[in-house]
Amino acid sequence: MSLQQIIDRRLSGKNKSIGNRERFLRRHKEQIREAVKRAVDGRGIRDMERGEEVHIPKKDLSEPIFSHGDGGVREVVRPGNQEYVKGDRVAKPKGGQGGGAGGGQASDSGEGEDDFVFHLSKEEFMQVFFDDLALPNLARTTLADTPEYKTHRAGFVSDGTPTNLHVVRSMRGALGRRIALGMSKRRELHELEAREQELLKEDRPETPRLLAETRECIAALRARLEAIPFLDPLDLRYRSRVRVPVPTTRAVMFCLMDVSGSMDEARKDLAKRFFILLYLFLTRHYEKIDVVFIRHHTQAQEVDEQNFFHATETGGTVVSSALVLMEQIIRERYSPTEWNIYGAQASDGDNWHHDSGRCRELLSAKILPLCRYFAYVQVAEPEQNLWEEYERLVEEQPHFAMRKAVEASQIYPVFRDLFKKEGASA
């Protein structure tokens, strides 16, 4: 029976082990997942494309061991005791003082153990977030729709256009060819020239005949050396470039949010968490992502991220104004044949009664035909007329989804439910 060996030749950094790191991530998956979730709170949407430092208590990394416990009755003498007598109970030092011979970080529990800290890479960070998730009905712009090519250098070839001629490479080849073809002839020529000089010094009857024959051979060799072309078509080398077709990898994410008086900071925070998750999710599928922030009350406007989440407004709500502005921006800047368009709308459900039907019509007729996916999240419990109108779209539009999240702990489950793989459990 032959012994088979598997060698892992993946590149890894100095003093690092890929296998050990993967086993560590699997073992402490739940703790890492919780740490990654907490990291979202203090980041902006565009600030998600980086790793994270994860802290794991040292006590959670310890291995179970067997040891002999202290048994029986023992008397111990502590030198320098001026405070206690036999029978007194000695309390633990406050603030983590004292204790061990090796020092250790102070803590308020009196345990002096350091946490284990390691850096989670960008790819590992996203993998923890979106394990078993995939874009629903992912249909990127195909090559036939928007052909794009990237040119890559592919060495040198012996034929091509004059503009791609590599002069240095061609001359180097010509020089090597001339040296190779004329080496033996030059060696023979040097020998004949030396023979000619020797014959000129001799004075024998056959010297003139030998000298004539030698000079004839010298002339023939020089003619053959001169016949070697300085530059032959075989020496020419041209730069080779190949065009490799690549799929379109551009996406735009529209964030629509109600900023009227009914949307307090807590509800805006819920919306921000959802937008962050969607943005980070899209970075796994697209190289270039634009983010468009549209806020609205009775009127809609495009703003930056700071004003989107932190500016306050008072007054009523007209949701259709945001949808109209979104369609206008798409027509002007983001052609559906070149961009993958995603929409995410967050609201407390409050809307002018006569406007909700118009919102449904705008989505059905103008917005959804241009989008890959559109998700609506209501950050309030009561189901008002906007929710009722949007429910009619769920049955008609497969790439439209709506959910409700009224607590921060519900954002991530709602997101997983919206973007889970087909056939996966919720």
Image: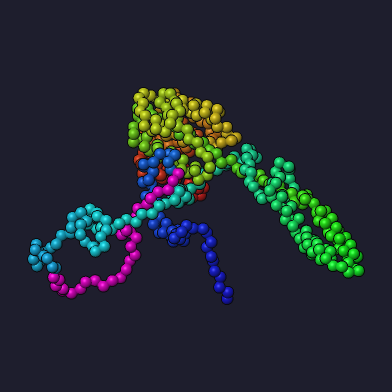
Residue 192, position in %: x, y?
A: 82, 63
In the rendered image, the residue lying farthest to the bottom is: 1
Tally of numbered discs = 0
- The image quarter containing residue 56 is bottom left
The boundaries of the magenta stretch are: 49-77
Q: Is residue 345 above or below residue 158?
A: above
For the residue pair 379 and 223, the one nearer the viewer reads as: 223
Can you give x and y, in whole percent of width and height, for residue 345 in the image? 45, 34
Q: Identify the image quadrant of residue 268.
A: top left
Task: State the residue in front, 383 or 61.
Answer: 61
135 or 311: which is nearer to us?
A: 311
Asked if residue 57 is among those painted magenta in the image, a careful observer would answer yes
Residue 140 vs residue 31: left or right?
A: right
Name the residue: 37% across, 45% down.
39
Position of residue 162 measured from the top left corner of the image (x, y, whole percent): 73, 42
Give the x, y percent position of residue 249. 56, 41
Q: Which residue lies at the image location 48% right of the left edge and 48% below the top edge?
A: 133
Magenta stretch, main secondary structure, is: loop
Q: Residue at x 39, y 57 (%)?
A: 28
In this rendering, does residue 274 appear at all?
no
